[in-house]
Amino acid sequence: MAKTDRVWAAYQRPMKTLRIALSGVAVLAVLAGASVGHAQSPTLLGVVGPGFSIRLSDAAGAPVKNLEPGTYTIRIQDNSEIHNFHLTGPGVNMATDIEQTGTVTWTVTLSAGAYHFQCDPHASTMFGNFTVGGSAPPPTTTTPPKPKPAPVRLAGSVGPGKRIALTRAGRKFAAMKAGPAVVVVSDKSAVDNFHLIGPGVNRATTKAGRASLIWRVTLKKGRYVFRSDATPALRGTFRVP
């Protein structure tokens, strides 16, 4: 090989190595760009039905309370033909069909603000809220319903002989608060009966026969009479103020 050729070959070797290195950098840059371009958005799961329930959770299954602004994939499982999943908020207003069931996937961009999801036919009881950006919404507080009053227990009796009574805890009374009552009736007469009459109540045992009965009644404001239909003198009264 001539001296000139040897010099040229020595010059070409580092240039070739540089071109290979630059090509490798270019390939890595393209792959990195492709990876960024196809990065998956966070996934949320919305479920409605089959009962009267609706929820929105993150990939870990936790209820969604607050999210960062950005693009999300929301997979909705609509399990009922009487419910739907309706999501509204800044830039979003999407809903499934009420009559159809199945799974649908939405890609949405959530901006800072408050969002709401509900079942449209049952919006007053099936709903949820979350925020995007800022702090999570305060916990929802509900007022528990007032407990129903326990029914008052009364004892009504007629006979044996010509006597009739209505007592509470073994004592006669002239007045009683409005509300539910359980009347335990003991009819020990083959002639007289026990008949309770008043607002919303008209209950009686038979005149010919003995019986032990339990009546569940609701006492309302007004005057009540307990009597024997066979013997008008057997009677008593009380009031509900």
Image (cartoon, grey):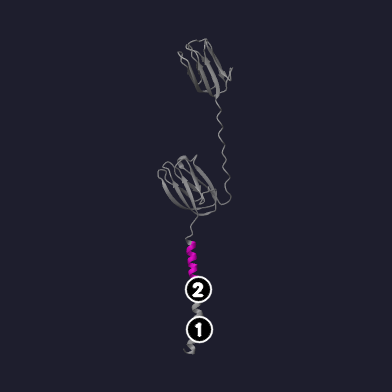
Residue 225 screen position, x and y as percent: 52, 16
For label 2, the crowd category at 10 Å Cα-Cα, with few meaning under 14, some 14 to 19 and many 20 or more, is few
Q: Main secondary structure of the magenta part?
A: helix
- Quickly name the residue at label 1: 10
Where does the C terminus fall, quadrant-wise? top right
User: What residue sits 53% from the left and 16% below the top?
Assistant: 157
Q: Earlier in the sequence, mark 1 or mark 2?
A: 1
Is 102 above or below relative to 150? below
Query: Which element carries disc 2, helix, strand or loop?
Result: helix
| 129, 88: nearer the viewer | 129
* Residue type indicated by callout 1: Ala
Magenta residues, start to end? 23-36
Is 159 above or below relative to 79? above
Is 20 above or below relative to 90? below
- Quickly name the residue at label 2: 22
Residue 147 screen position, x and y as percent: 56, 31
* Residue type indicated by callout 2: Leu
Is 176 above or below relative to 68? above
Residue 219 screen position, x and y as percent: 53, 22
For label 1, the crowd category at 10 Å Cα-Cα, with few meaning under 14, some 14 to 19 and many 20 or more, is few
